[in-house]
Amino acid sequence: MTILDKYFADFTPTQIEQFGLLKDLYTEWNEKINVISRKDIEHIYTHHVLHSLSIAAVAEFNSGMEIIDIGCGGGFPGVPLAIFYPDVQFHLVDSIGKKLKVVEAVAAAAGIKNITTQHTRAEEIKGRKFHFAVSRAVAPLKELWHWSAPLLRKGNAALLDNGLICLKGGDLHQEIFESNVKPRMIKIYDIFPEEYFQEKFIIHVPK
């Protein structure tokens, strides 16, 4: 938790408790269903929670907004963001049902009330619109935009225009070129100057 305290100073007692529960909950569930690399579990607050919260550092989600987490896996970035924004609704979607079982168990145990889940592929969701789509290391940007664009509402209700916000790492030039979109790239290291984030980026594609 100390790494979160280094960058965020105004958590409520409920948020402190919820964030504090994550390591033990994920450690327990990871023994049953592997959703985090075993060597990473000791670094969960930097590599997973703080990484997820980099989105909160650049995009202010307002009360009542609806956010979809595409390919949420074990719940990142959706679970930390749901704790950070208790008045925002997060819909976590994955094609692998057992990963959603972990998300649901963690949310229930930590008392996170603003998460719903759906066992499906994003491209199969019909009749719903969201203010933002978030994702972490799920697919190339071209595919992510293809999946998310039909699910997004147009608008500018936050610091960033409604759109796709994804977390990616490494050399992204070719991936961005092939995506046929012009995203904004933000270096996470500029927000959280920790060694782990040196080659990691937030990518924002407005609707």
Image (cartoon, rainbow, N blue to C red):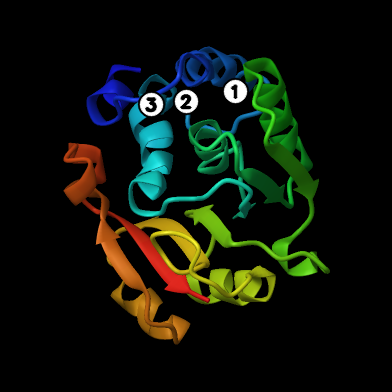
Task: Give SS at disc 2.
Answer: loop
Which mark lies nearer to you, 3 or 2?
A: 3
**Contact between labelled residues 1 and 2, with CB atoms less than 8 Å apart:** yes
The Cα atoms of the two marked residues, 2 and 1, are separated by 8 Å
Mark sitting on residue 45: 3
The Cα atoms of the two marked residues, 3 and 2, are separated by 14 Å
The Cα atoms of the two marked residues, 3 and 1, are separated by 15 Å
Q: Position of residue 81 (x, y in %)?
A: 51, 39
Q: Which residue is mark 1?
A: 30
Q: Position of residue 23 (x, y in %)?
A: 48, 17
Q: Is residue 22 left or right of residue 153?
A: left
Q: Residue at x 60, y 14 (%)?
A: 28
Q: Amino acid at mark 3?
A: Tyr
Task: Give SS at disc 3.
Answer: helix
Tell me if residue 97 can be seen: yes
Q: Amino acid at mark 2?
A: Arg
Q: Residues within 10 Å of mark 2 (few under 14, many from 20)?
A: few
Instruction: Specify which label sits upstream in the sequence, 3 or 2.
Output: 2
Q: In this orientation, which residue lies closer to the viewer: 43 or 189?
A: 189
Q: Is residue 111 left or right of residue 175?
A: right
Q: Residues within 10 Å of mark 3 (few under 14, many from 20)?
A: many
Q: Amino acid at mark 1?
A: Asn
Q: Which residue is mark 2?
A: 38
Q: Position of residue 26 (x, y in %)?
A: 56, 21
Instruction: Specify which label sits upstream in the sequence, 3 or 1.
Output: 1
Q: Is residue 31 above or below residue 196?
A: above
